[in-house]
Image (cartoon, rainbow, N blue to C red):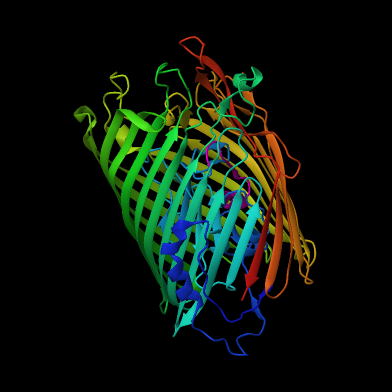
């Protein structure tokens, strides 16, 4: 249990560093003003916090499923909001570009790019972007305020009927607080121009709760010749009512960010002394991103089950300037390009579950999802110093989908239960291209069966046999294309939906009441891999692939103060290529993480975290490999009923290992026209200190 103190709230003023904050300040003031707490309300309250200490025995549908709570997140030193996803055991989150871009992610032998095979949801809204300007399944959670997260429920593998698109490797549902544990003001400063101001709070409006949070951040970064000049604003306002059984919530979110970026660089440029390892070849890269959303969620309990529903609308815009190959394609103007995306997303979902049979032997669940992406413009342009000089392609796309699923959980016997699931998805793509030969309309559907058999060994242990089908959709433009827009060469369209099939044998157990462990042996095959193409700055469909691996995850509450985490994941990933060059670029064979954390009742707290991933292939014949990397970070602080001070030491040992590596051809001044194939990397950000002071009331 974690204790919080309630006191009278007050309004948050504007932060002078962020002119963008002023438009949202009133919302936070409304949420934190105008309520006087009684003496009874001001007492210490015990609040149950979900987290990795929860084993989910009797609830999980596979061994690779778990919950992360705010208590887990609060103890993590975070360089970026995307690092929250590293709470999923075995997940690696990196960055090869600027602070405002979606992270690069790796899980179960997948280079997930920016989320192609891992589905992420926040308060009932999908985060993955279809037919995105930068990459299929683009998952940008920079709009998320980590302190506002109540829980993150993750699953791995395609065994859950409620997960559809981008679900081959798994997915995560992130939930923000309806009511915050406490109101707070936080001010943070750090090296390289880092500043952060956060105000958040909740108040009662009759029987309803109003919660709001407002965050502003600046950051210059540690790069030699690029000032990141990050200016980010996040806002959240949520109105809710009800208890755990019957409730509703309406949430508005707003995010705006501008930044410059230092991208990956060729190793030879560092070796030749042209730049140092934190330098840049093109110093005019970066991006702008904006996201605004309105969503609603509803849950109610019936006599035999319950109903839940969600609806959302998202307005999204992004401009991203990149240059991976420098002078390879255009030796005069250079290879810089802009990717643009402007869309509105409408959608919703609903579920109905009910129990039947003696002692609720049968548990039924049916659900439906609708989504419509109205993409006003998604484009690729050749640029110089961020100025457009040519259009490679520009399209308008309408993409819609409907998904239906049914799931039956059957208590076969005292120790046996099974879950049968069946999901069907239908997609419609309508592409209006600037080149009419690439316009068109396509549709596709897929049926995805799911199955899990669970044997309860004891009150603290369960064994699982799981199998299922998942899928990811491909970029709508690829389903109608007939002519390459850059070369005018005839091309073959790709399949609209790509199937994946997997199975898993696993075990969950609790040792000595304090040690949660899970062990999983899994297998997955994918009909078509998506791989990063350096000279195009995008991904393309490749060969079918097969993966199998072992995961062993552990969380040990040593005593009431200390906790230890230790997770290890090993994967073998191969193309289905008849024994020829079958290594999958970016497939990491071994990932290991460990953390030691403490929360002392006298106020002291902290965590030391270590992350390692092994060498991995950069090309199919494995002749070029990344070296792998190790990084450690530390968080330490003290809190009282009202005050908290926290120091984060990021990259504790100042490692200069690589955040990410690629191998492809690029061309620097004076090099041959065909360029030089080389390792392109981005080094870890150096050790830096960040200090945050919070006042809770």
In the rendered image, residue 235 lying in the magenta stretch gets the answer: no
Q: Position of residue 582 (x, y in %)?
A: 54, 23
Residue 695 relative to residue 112: left or right? right
In the rendered image, residue 93 lying in the magenta stretch gets the answer: yes
State whether residue 162 is above or below residue 490.
below
To which quarter of the image does residue 653 belong?
A: top right
Q: Is residue 616 visible?
A: yes
Point out the residue furthest to the front here.
Answer: 16
The residue nearer to you, when weighing 176 against 121, is 176
Q: Position of residue 265 (x, y in %)?
A: 57, 27
Q: Position of residue 693 (x, y in %)?
A: 67, 63
The residue nearer to you, when weighing 78 against 234, is 234
Quadrant where the C terminus sits is bottom right
State whether residue 302 is above or below residue 91.
below
Identity of the residue drawn at 33% across and 57% down: 347
Q: Position of residue 193 (x, y in %)?
A: 61, 48
State whether residue 29 is above or below residue 41.
above
Identity of the residue drawn at 74% across and 61% down: 637
The residue nearer to you, when weighing 488 against 168, is 488
Quadrant where the N terminus sits is bottom right
What count of labels does the image hold?
0
State whether residue 16 is above or below residue 7.
above
To which quarter of the image does residue 312 belong?
A: bottom left
Residue 616 relative to residue 476: left or right? right
| Residue range corresponding to the magenta coloring | 82-98
Point out the residue furthest to the top here.
Answer: 672
Point out the residue furthest to the bottom here.
Answer: 39
Q: Is residue 65 visible?
A: no
Residue 623 relative to residue 637: left or right? left
């Amino acid at each position: 249990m974690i204790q919080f103190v309630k006191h009278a709230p007050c309004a948050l003023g504007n932060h002078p560093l962020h002119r963008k904050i002023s438009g949202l300040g009133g919302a936070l003031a409304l949420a934190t003003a105008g309520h006087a707490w009684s003496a009874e309300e001001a007492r210490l309250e015990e609040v149950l916090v979900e987290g990795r200490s929860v084993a989910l025995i009797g609830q999980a549908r596979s061994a690779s499923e778990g919950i992360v709570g705010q208590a887990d997140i609060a103890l993590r030193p975070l360089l970026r909001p995307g690092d929250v996803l590293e709470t999923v055991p075995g997940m690696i989150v990196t960055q090869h570009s600027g602070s405002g871009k979606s992270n690069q992610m790796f899980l179960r032998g997948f280079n997930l790019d920016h989320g192609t095979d891992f589905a992420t949801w926040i308060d009932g809204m999908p985060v993955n972007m279809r037919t995105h300007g930068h990459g299929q399944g683009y998952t940008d959670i920079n709009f998320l305020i980590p302190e506002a997260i109540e829980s993150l429920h993750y699953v791995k593998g395609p065994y859950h009927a409620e997960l559809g698109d981008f679900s081959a490797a798994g997915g995560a549902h992130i939930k923000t607080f309806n009511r915050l544990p406490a109101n707070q003001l936080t001010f943070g400063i750090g090296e390289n121009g880092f500043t952060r101001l956060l105000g958040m709070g909740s108040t009662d409006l009759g029987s309803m709760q109003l919660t709001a949070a407002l965050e502003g951040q600046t950051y210059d970064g540690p790069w030699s010749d690029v000032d990141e000049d990050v200016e980010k604003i996040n806002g959240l306002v949520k109105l809710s009512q009800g208890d755990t059984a019957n409730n509703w919530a309406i949430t508005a979110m707003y995010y705006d960010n501008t930044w410059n970026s230092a991208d990956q660089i060729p190793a030879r440029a560092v070796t030749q002394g042209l730049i140092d390892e934190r330098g840049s070849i093109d110093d005019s890269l970066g991006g702008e991103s904006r996201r605004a959303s309105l969503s609603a969620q509803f849950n109610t309990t019936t006599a035999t089950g319950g109903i839940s529903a969600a609806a959302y609308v998202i307005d999204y815009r992004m401009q991203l300037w990149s240059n991976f190959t420098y002078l390879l394609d255009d030796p005069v103007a250079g290879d810089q390009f802009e990717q643009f995306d402007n869309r509105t997303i409408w959608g919703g979902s609903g579920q109905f579950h009910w129990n039947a049979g003696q002692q609720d032997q049968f548990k039924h669940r049916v659900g439906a999802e609708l989504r419509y992406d109205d993409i006003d413009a998604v484009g690729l342009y050749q640029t110089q110093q961020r100025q457009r000089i040519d259009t490679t392609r520009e399209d308008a796309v309408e993409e819609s989908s409907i998904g239906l699923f049914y799931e039956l959980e059957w208590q076969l016997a005292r120790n046996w239960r099974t879950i049968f699931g069946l999901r069907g998805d239908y997609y419609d793509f309508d592409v209006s291209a600037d080149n009419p030969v690439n316009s068109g309309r396509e549709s596709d559907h897929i049926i995805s069966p799911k199955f899990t058999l669970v044997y309860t060994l004891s009150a603290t242990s369960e064994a699982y046999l799981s199998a299922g089908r998942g899928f990811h959709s491909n970029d709508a433009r690829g389903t109608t294309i007939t002519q390459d827009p850059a070369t005018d060469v005839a091309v073959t369209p790709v399949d609209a939906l790509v199937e994946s099939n997997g199975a898993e044998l696993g075990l969950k157990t609790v040792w000595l009441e304090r040690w949660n462990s899970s062990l999983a042996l899994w297998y997955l095959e994918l009909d078509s891999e998506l791989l990063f193409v350096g000279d195009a700055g995008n991904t393309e469909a490749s060969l079918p692939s097969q993966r199998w691996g072992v995961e062993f995850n552990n969380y040990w509450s040593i005593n009431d103060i200390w906790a230890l985490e230790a997770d290890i994941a090993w994967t073998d990933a191969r193309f289905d290529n008849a024994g020829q060059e079958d290594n999958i670029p970016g497939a990491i064979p071994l990932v290991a993480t460990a953390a030691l954390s403490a929360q002392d009742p006298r106020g002291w707290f902290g965590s030391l975290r270590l992350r390692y991933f092994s060498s991995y292939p950069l090309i199919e014949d494995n002749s070029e490999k990344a070296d792998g990397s190790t990084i450690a970070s530390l968080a330490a602080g003290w809190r009282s009923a009202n005050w908290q001070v926290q120091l984060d030491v990021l990259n504790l040992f100042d490692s200069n290992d690589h955040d990410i590596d690629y191998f492809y051809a690029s061309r620097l001044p004076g090099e041959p026209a065909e360029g030089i194939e080389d390792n392109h990397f981005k080094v870890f950000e150096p050790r830096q200190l960040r200090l945050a002071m919070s006042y809770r009331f």
